[in-house]
Amino acid sequence: MKPFRFLFPRLAVLFILLFVLGACSRPDPVPIQDLADTAVQGSSVVTEKTAESSSRGLILIDPGHGFDDPGCTSYDGSFTEAQITESVARLLQKELISRGWNTELTHDGTHMPDAALLHESAQKMTLQNDININPQEWVCDNNLFSKYERVLWANARSRKQPATLLLSLHVNSIETSAQTVRGFEIDYYKDHPCANAAGDFSEILHDILKDTFNQKVKLFADNKEEAFVVTKYTDMPSVLLEMGYASNAADAALLKSSEFQTQLVQTIADAVDAAYSM
Ligand SMILES: [Zn+2]
């Protein structure tokens, strides 16, 4: 027996594996390890904490809007987008935890992870030069947790424990003349370093939603101009789900019903399981 005969091939395989895993991340624009540490502490505002020892990976859930930004409003004024995204996010977090996933919300709607540190880090972040936005837009006030800060927070959290997926939850709306438009919409950024992983999950989510709800499900691989901040600038595979149209009466009735929300989170969790359990 010559045990070392296989050492080099095995090392080569190990290095290739590490290279492939490492390739699915952006170059680090600035060292923000400090932010990661504090951001994780800041996330203690999230009530449903998970076991760090969870073996199934980390899923980040971003309830779209919140704080001073209600998002869209339903056609009859009975709910705002932020109310629905926060409710579904909490249910989804519970469901994923029950299935063994580690999950965290980017915010709980009223408290944000360490705002002062996010301000400082945002101003330092060289990435903003690519993004071509006013640096002031990176800076939150006490009542606003912007989409840019969600990205900063998610990237920092993922440096602590690489996230398998970030799912941003939203509700669609369209002008009153098109109130018949309804259904789901899924978006990811086609030129993201993790576009393949985001695309695979999106396809699975698309099929499961279509089968479960028998509804139209649009799936878009967005280009740079079309992509959302949260799908474009995050380090991990990132997918945005529009859960229905607040401007459509049938969708609005579903969105605010607890039965639909429960079935929806089970469907999303099934897609997560199907995409990442192999
Ligand atoms: Zn939205």
Image: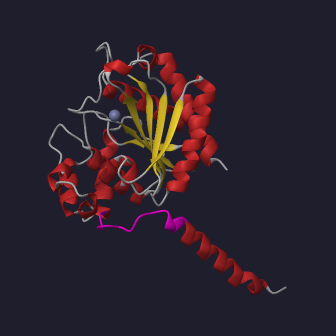
Q: Position of residue 1 (x, y in %)?
A: 85, 85
Q: Nearer the viewer, residue 56 or 50?
A: 56
**x and y percentages locating residue 188 in the rendered image:** 46, 47
Instruction: Give the residue displayed 46% in from the left and 23% down from the top.
Output: 182
**Which of the four quarters of the rendered structure image does ligand 1 lie in?**
top left
**Residue 246: percent from left, percent from top:** 37, 21
Q: Is residue 61 above or below residue 131?
A: above
Residue 29: within the magenta?
yes
Vertical side of 69 occupied by 278: above or below: below
State whether the magenta stretch is mostly helix, strand or loop: loop
Q: Is residue 128 left or right of residue 100?
A: left
Is 19 left or right of 125, judged from the image as shown?
right
Picture residue at 27% right of the left edge, 33% below the top? 66
> Quick check: is 6 in the magenta stretch?
no
Q: Indicate the quadrant where residue 123 lies.
A: bottom left
Residue 54 shows in the view: no
Q: Is residue 18 left or right of residue 130?
A: right
Q: Is residue 43 left or right of residue 97?
A: left
Colour scheme used in the picture? secondary structure
In the rendered view, tell whether residue 4 sits above or below residue 105: below
Query: How many numbered dots are placed on residues in this image?
Result: 0
Locate residue 213, reporting x and y percent. 58, 23
**In this view, which residue lies farthest toward the right?**
1
Determine the image quadrant of residue 69: top left
Nearer to me, 175 or 269:
175
Using the rendered image of the protein, determine whether residue 116 is visible from the camera's viewpoint: yes
Q: What's the residue at 32%, 23% (across, down)? A: 175
Given the current orientation, which residue lies at the most extreme front position? 177
| Magenta highlight range | 21-32
